Image (tube, rainbow, N blue to C red):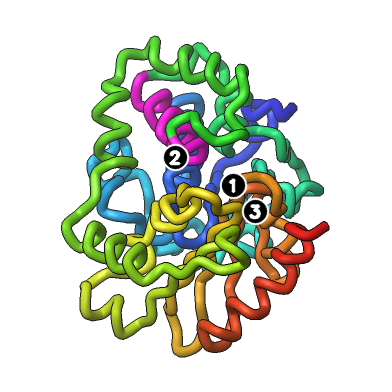
Amino acid sequence: MIDLIKECSAAQNIGISGHIRPDGDCIGSTLSLCLYLRKVFPEKRVDLFLEPYAEAFQDVEGIDAIDHSFQGADHYDVYFCVDCGKDRLGDAEALFDAAEKTINIDHHISNKNGCGDVNYVEPEASSASELVFDLLDPGYIDAKIAAAIYMGIVHDTGIFQYSSTSPKTMRIAAQLMEYGFDFSQLIDKTFNEKTYHQDQIMGRALLESILFMDGRCIFSAIDHKTMEFYDVCGKDMEGIVSRLRETKGVECAIFMYEYEPLTYKVSLRSCGKVDVAKVAAIFGGGGHVRAAGCTINGTVHDVINNLSVHIEKQLEG
């Protein structure tokens, strides 16, 4: 366990970043950590750098603490890498590498050894937000910090339905609710609510999905031309792969979208028989047993054929 106050007490400049294409847990964990450290150390500079986030998060309290510029202090005494290894920090990797002390907080098994001078990596945890909660002094937590942590947990547990949800997760959620924020509205606004264009692209993806491997797998792909037609980007694809996984009889779901010519961002979800983290790792990605992702070059058929070989081995094993 890390003593955050001790680790940061001598620092004047503190930086925080999470992974590229930030999701709810990435935003919740990094934002709560930033707000907490600013409260504990009002005299210190605490910067939070993330790539632009989905529109759904724009009204989260405290969200304006996030800086998209990656132009902060000349040097950071302490830099946090949260919810990923440093190879997924994007533009923040250089800031992390240049820092005097680096701290890694993560729950991805693909990063089980950590990437910092100091590491708190627990692959069994439901979310990075749960791990951040472990490290906070309750005396400094307020409604804004609690809401950010709660949001992160909600997003990475699928509102407490994924297998990573533990009794500890539920106890933490209960403690957070005691701070009095509107948890129902938070879930609706950041998790459930979709724009019209997001609904359209979800419908298109489901309509064109294909079952294979005797109905045990399903995939759908959206090319760049289709994304332009519906005026959507990668941030608008949240939730599609999870909906595909809910198809009756399916053990593994694949969703991909083209973000560069013949380059696909691939999301994998499993019901448990397939360790998709192992599959993703083969292609330079990572994640968890039931949820993982990677980037693969080639046509849609190339991507599916390459993934299928490894998925089928696990299903038949």
- Say which quarter of the image contains residue 38: top left
Image coordinates of residue 284 in percent, x first then y, are 70, 70
Residue type highlighted by circle 2: His
Tell me which numbered mark, 3 or 1, is placed earlier along the sequence: 1
Q: Residue at x 53, y 48 (%)?
A: 16
Residue 317 visible in the shown view: yes
Image coordinates of residue 212 in percent, x first then y, are 56, 68
Residue type highlighted by circle 3: Gly
Q: Secondary structure at mark 3?
A: strand
Task: Confirm or deny contact between disc 2 and disc 3 (CB under 8 A).
Answer: no
Say whether residue 269 is left or right of residue 112. left
Q: How many angstroms separate mark 3 from mark 1 (CA)?
A: 10 Å
Q: Nearer the viewer, residue 258 or 317?
A: 317
Q: Residue at x 71, y 53 (%)?
A: 275
Q: Residue at x 57, y 23 (%)?
A: 169
User: In this rendering, is residue 287 above or below 155?
Assistant: below
Instruction: Please give the label number shown on residue 155.
Output: 2
* Magenta range: 143-158
The residue where tag 3 is placed is 287
What main secondary structure does the magenta stretch of the protein show? helix
Q: Secondary structure at mark 1?
A: loop
The residue where tag 1 is placed is 83
- Say which quarter of the image contains residue 244: bottom left
Q: Which quarter of the image is occupied by the N terminus? A: top right
Label tally: 3
Badge 1 density bin: few <14, some 14–19, many ≥20, Cα 10 Å: many
Q: Nearer the viewer, mark 3 or mark 1?
A: 3
Q: Residue at x 29, y 68 (%)?
A: 204
Badge 3 density bin: few <14, some 14–19, many ≥20, Cα 10 Å: many
